[in-house]
Amino acid sequence: MDRQPEVAQPRPAPSLRAEGVTAGYGGVPVIRDVSIAVGPAEIVAVIGPNGAGKSTLLKSLVGILRVTSGRVVLGDGDDVTNRPPEELARRGVGYVPQVNDIFEPLTVLENLEMGGYLLPAARIKERVDEVGKVFPALPPMLKRRADKLSGGERKMLAIARVLMLDPKVLILDEPTANLSPKLADSLLHEHVKRLAGVGKAVLLVEQRARAALEIAAWTSVLVSGTTRLEGRPQDLLRRPDFEELFLGAGPARTAREESDEKENEKS
Ligand SMILES: Nc1ncnc2c1ncn2[C@@H]1O[C@H](COP(=O)(O)OP(=O)(O)OP(=O)(O)O)[C@@H](O)[C@H]1O
Ligand SMILES: [Mg+2]
C-alpha cells in the first residue's frame, strides 16, 4: 500500500464547489451540467475556446446569473445557489470579472475603499495597508486615478479591490487578458501563485492555456458549455491528443492573441 510511485497530492476538501450547474441567458442554457471544485491553497484553471461558457460559469457561481439546475455549495455543505452577489462576497467569495473590474473615474484608494464596503470604517484603513503589502506596487499610487493605470497595474488593483474583504475563494476571469506575455507570466506565476500560497482557493479562467496548466493543480476544459476533460495538468499533458485539441492555435485563439498584442503595442 505505501509503495505507490508518483502519487499525486490528494486534492483539498473544497471551499467552493459547483455540482451539475446549468445556466444561460433568456432561458437558453449556455453551460450544462458543469461540476467544478476548488479548495484552500489550490489553483483550479478553467480553459477552453472563446464562447465556451467560461465567464458564464463564473457568473453563475457568484450569483450574477441564475442557476437553472444544479447547486453551488460553500465549505462542507452551505448551499448558496442563486444567492445574491453581495451575500457571496460577505461569505468569502471574491470575484474579479473579465471586464468592468474597477471604477475608472475613482482613485486607486477609492477603489480599494469601495472593495471594503462591507467592513467597518476603521477596518477598511487597515485592510488598505494589508492589501498594499500583497501588491507593493499599489501604495505609491493610491492617489492616482484608476483610468491612468497601465494594464498590469489595473489588473493588480482589480484583484486588490476584491482582496479587501479577505476572501477565502478568489474567482478570476482572464486576469491576463490584454497583458503582454511577460506581464501575464508575472501575474500568474508571482501574484496568483502567491495568493494560493497564503491559502486562498483560486478558481481561474485563462485563455493562456499553457500558462494556466503550469500553475494549476487541477484543470477543467470547457467546450461548448460542457466539461470536455478534467484532471491534473501533468496527466492532461500526457494525453497524446491534448496538445493538438486544446493547446493548438485555433482561429479564435489566434484572433485573441493578435488583439492582445495590438493592445500591448498601445501601452
Ligand atoms: N449577456 C449575454 N446574453 C446573451 N448571451 C450571452 C451573454 N453573455 C454571453 N453570452 C453567450 O454565451 C456564450 C458563452 O459566453 P461566455 O462569455 O461565457 O464565453 P467565454 O468562454 O467566457 O468566452 P471568452 O473566452 O471569449 O471570454 C457565448 O455564445 C456568448 O455569446
Ligand atoms: Mg469569458
Image (cartoon, rainbow, N blue to C red):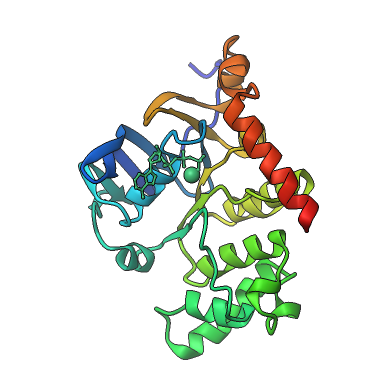
37 or 265, which lies in front?
Answer: 265
Label tally: 0
Seen from this angle, which residue lies furthest bottom? 122
- Report the residue that reaches farthest toward the top: 240
Residue 21 in sight: no
- Residue at 34%, 62% (x, y): give it: 88
Q: Quadrant of residue 82?
A: bottom left
Residue found 68% across the figure and 38% down from its top:
257
Question: Which residue is located at x 73 percent, y 64 percent?
Answer: 150
Q: On the picture, is 86 further left or further right than 155?
A: left
Rendering quarter of residue 22: top left
Work out which quarter of the rendered image holds the C terminus and state it.
Answer: bottom right
**Residue occupying the point 51% across, 83% down:** 124
Is 212 placed above or below 119 here? Answer: above
Give the quadrant of ligand 1. Answer: top left
Near-viewer residue (16 or 153): 153
Q: Position of residue 45 (x, y in %)?
A: 52, 38
Image quadrant where residue 142 sits: bottom right
Compared with 231, 115 (above or below) is below
Viewer-proximal residue among 64 and 172? 64
Can I make out residue 24 in this image? yes
Looking at the picture, how far across and down is residue 133, in whole percent? 68, 71
Horizontal relation, residue 2 to residue 56: left or right: right
Residue 222, position as x, y percentages in the image: 44, 30
